[in-house]
Amino acid sequence: MIHPFDDYPLHQSSAPLLHTISDSAGHYDRYFYNGHDASGSVFLAGALGVYPNRQVMDASFSILVDGVQHNIRASRQCTTDRTHTEVGAVKVTVVEPMREHRLTVDGRHGLAADVVWRATSPVIEEAPFRRIVEGRPVFDYTRITQFGEWSGWIDIDGTRLDLADLGKVYGCRDRSWGLRNGTRGIPGPAHDRTFHWHWIPTVLADRCLQVALNEDPTGRPWHRSGAVTERFAPGEREVDALVDEARLIRATDTEVSVEWRPGTRWPSQAHVDVSLWRAEPLRLDYRPLARFQMNGIGYTHPEWGHGTWRGEFDETRDRIVLADVDPMDLANLHVQQVCEVTSPDHPDSPVGIAVLETLAIGPHAPSGFVGFDDGAR
């Protein structure tokens, strides 16, 4: 199965580029984007994923405004050419790698968009995600995170929202690929769905901070990642600078402590301590301003979960009224919250803005969670 990309010297094995390195159903390759204004009154998100061994490509786009989240989700059969990154109404275009991406929604369901993300930081390659349970790989993948700003417009049932009217629209993207949920569907004992996760991209005055943390039920980290890098004007740096590891200051240690909203698994506030290599440590507090439900773009959705086979083509639009969301429904545990960031030494003076992503499923001793889905006390 030869593809034009096989003409480039990029091969990692003797196989053509479109041949997967693993036959696991969990093998995947994915884009994710978010964006928000400084107050969190508007939040947008998009995603596109490929599951070659399932022959599935799916995509989604969501916009949250006035307390209502409008969602488009689509899925199609994907057999060979994975470079055609369009699923139904939603299309992702890499205009210039690592520097500029474009998301469009064609309006066939009353929701249309044409938005462009431009980089404001170098790429942060996070520490490898590798989790082995009883000798079987559950996770084995790479993720990069990069900060940027958005421009463009979104139209919701005839009401147009120009992002320029919101001031700066901050946002970040990630790309991840490899093996995720690698034991799902394999005969044998039930798959352990316990998962405790924080992902915290933070925009400060002149730099960006990324923290990611996975912990087991005892609170012991099995993945920990952190880095600080420069912040610059959108599209200002050349591509070579955007992938320059020397522009990062890596964390030597990261700690995240969370206070949970009673009766939920959503944070009410968080504190982050980051020790940096040959640099002053960072101590930051996070106070949520707005909440986005990740199932709007497929995460933990019971019917539109990522990589789910829905036939040759399927597409839907729905909406989520945030005030009506049941916080303890499993599909609603995964959230991103726009946060005001302050320093403990100067709690009345914001120093930045961030997105605090959390997903807490199952027991977690430091949080006081003892069951699979009990809320905070």
Image (tube, rainbow, N blue to C red):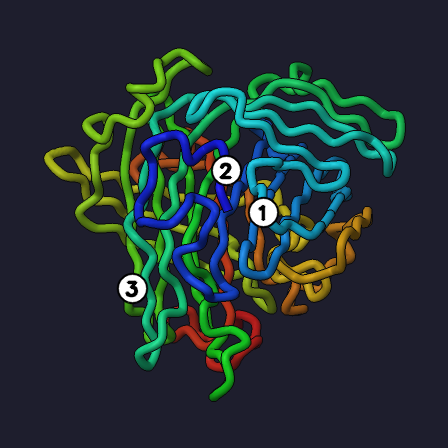
Look at the image and tell me whether residue 249 can be seen: yes
Q: In the rendering, at what x and y percent does residue 251 appear?
A: 21, 43
Report the residue that reaches farthest toward the front: 1
In the depicted structure, whether residue 292 falls above or below residue 214: above
> How many angstroms separate mark 2 from mark 1 (CA)?
9 Å
Reading the chain from its start, which is encountered first: label 3 or label 1?
Answer: 1
Q: Amino acid under label 2?
A: His
Q: In the rendering, at what x and y percent does residue 375 appear?
A: 57, 72
Q: Which residue is mark 1?
A: 80
Mark drawn on residue 129: none
Q: Amino acid under label 3?
A: Pro
* Secondary structure under the numbered disc 2 in the rendered image: loop
Q: Amino acid under label 1?
A: Thr
Task: Give the left or right position of residue 307, taking residue 222 as reference.
Answer: right
Q: Nearer the viewer, residue 320 or 113?
A: 113
Q: Which residue is mark 2?
A: 3
Mark drawn on residue 221: 3
Residue at horizontal 40 percent and vertical 69 percent from the top: 138
Residue at horizontal 19 percent and vertical 27 percent from the top: 246
> How many angstroms separate mark 3 from mark 1 (CA)?
38 Å
Residue at horizontal 54 percent and vertical 54 percent from the top: 52
Could you tell me if the residues under marks 2 and 1 are in contact, i.e. CB atoms within 8 Å? yes
